[in-house]
Image (cartoon, rainbow, N blue to C red):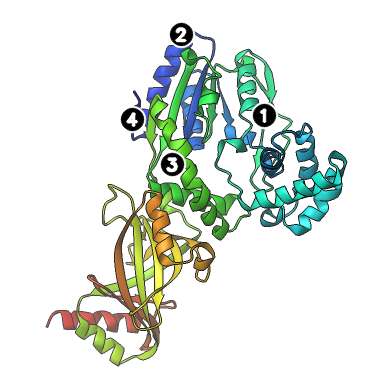
Amino acid sequence: MSYFVHHPDKWVSANIDLIEECLEKHDKTVVIIAGASSSGKSYCSSLLAQFLKAKGHHPLSISLDSYNFGLSGIISNKVNLHYFNNSLKDIRKIASDIKSVITDIPFDKKYDEEALVKIEPVIAKYFNDEDKEKFLKGLHEEWKVLNFDEPTVYDMEEASQDVHTLLKGGTIEKKKYSKVVSERVPTNVFLDGKECDVIIMEGIYALTPSLVKSFDHKNLITNFIDSDPKTLYLRRIIRDAKETSASSVFTTSLYFKYIVPSYINTILPNKDHADVVFVNDMTFMEMKEGTLYTTKMEMQTKSWEAIDHIIRHSKLHKITYEKDTYFTSRDEPLNSQNILRLRCYSDDEGKTYIPSSLVHKGLPKVRRDGKSIRPINVLIKEGDFFKVWPSEMDCLQDFAKAGCLIGPVQKKIKWKIEYKNQNLTIRYVEGNGYFVEFDKPYVKEAIDYTKNTIARYENK
């Protein structure tokens, strides 16, 4: 039966207790940390190693991500399986030669027609003309259905062999996978099994039954790191935007097409076999980070008379109609400031809406001067929505299948105006009244006049 924890300190404590129990009977122990993509496995591995060192242990951490075959190996292995029934004896050499060609090619063009022209001469020696054409066609087709989140992406056998070598006190070369070039890269760093007593191995498929069975359960400790669906999506998309060259359109499409089904069908079932389960939802610090930061000064009122007065005495620039749909997770407070929002616009005064953008807003920081600063991550920018989903309903269905809850939905009207030389936006939010937001540069006279106008009408 698994032991569930919701705090990193409790998770570390549970593991250290199990580790020290194992080390009473064995020279070394293996700790496996598995879980969903972007659940926090690397963070947990680092945290556990830190506490183990503080207690006098000698941990050594291995990431299963480092055993990724790379795009040269993944695609080649798929072609070998699906087009040649795993009969190609030189598949590793073929993959290595392909790697020499595609490493510096941009991610989304690795196996396009132009890349295949460059690959053809380096693999010609392995095939007759017919099989060469079949292999090249296979590369192109398998690239279209690439799925990074399945067990075949990783060399499980090599990972198992390395851990067993370390358990026996041997030495291995540290593996490294570069997300920039999507290939393995050399490290020239060696890990010595004689210098460690705890081997920590983390990865989404670290609890794959075939891998787990290769170790002695008596000195094995298994963990599953889980999180709510909204957090998993946000972490994956925000992380990939920082660490890879792939576009957010590509990453989001990949997420719902492959990552979510892989998690539900092949990763989540392993949770039941873990000794310890850590539910690692989005942290406070994560919700304070963003790629954009907006400073906002605004006032709120429910008085239409005050708003009407301001609009009538202003220069109107534009009126827009919007619909915002918010995605939440089970047990998330309704007033949560961790916002994931789909925005739709209307060109017919709110009769119909067209989906436009997907944005994450984190926790705002309210300053003493009344302004608030909020971190923002633009996940799908305006104009890119239909590159991912054919309709609003398809988007909502994808998030629902991933486990997110849909709602609430808010309709808004926005007036862009110039009031006493101050550009500002008035927005009406269905059920919440009116908000007056001032654009920079701030005009003190206009802000003071707006404040007094609202107060005068509210006090009538």
Give the CA separation, mark 3 to mark 2: 37 Å
Q: Quadrant of the C terminus?
A: bottom left
Give the CA separation, mark 4 to mark 3: 19 Å
Q: Is residue 285 visible?
A: no
For label 3, the residue is 264
Give SS at disc 3.
helix
Identify whether 282 is placed above or below 452.
Answer: above
Identify whether 125 is placed above or below 55.
Answer: below
For marks 1 and 3, the one nearer the N-term is 1
For label 4, the residue is 4
Q: Amino acid at mark 2?
A: Glu
Q: Residues within 10 Å of mark 4 (few under 14, many from 20)?
A: some
For label 1, the residue is 174
Give the CA separation, mark 1 to mark 4: 32 Å
* Count of marks overlaid on the render: 4
Question: Which residue is nearer to you in this view: 347 or 130?
Answer: 130
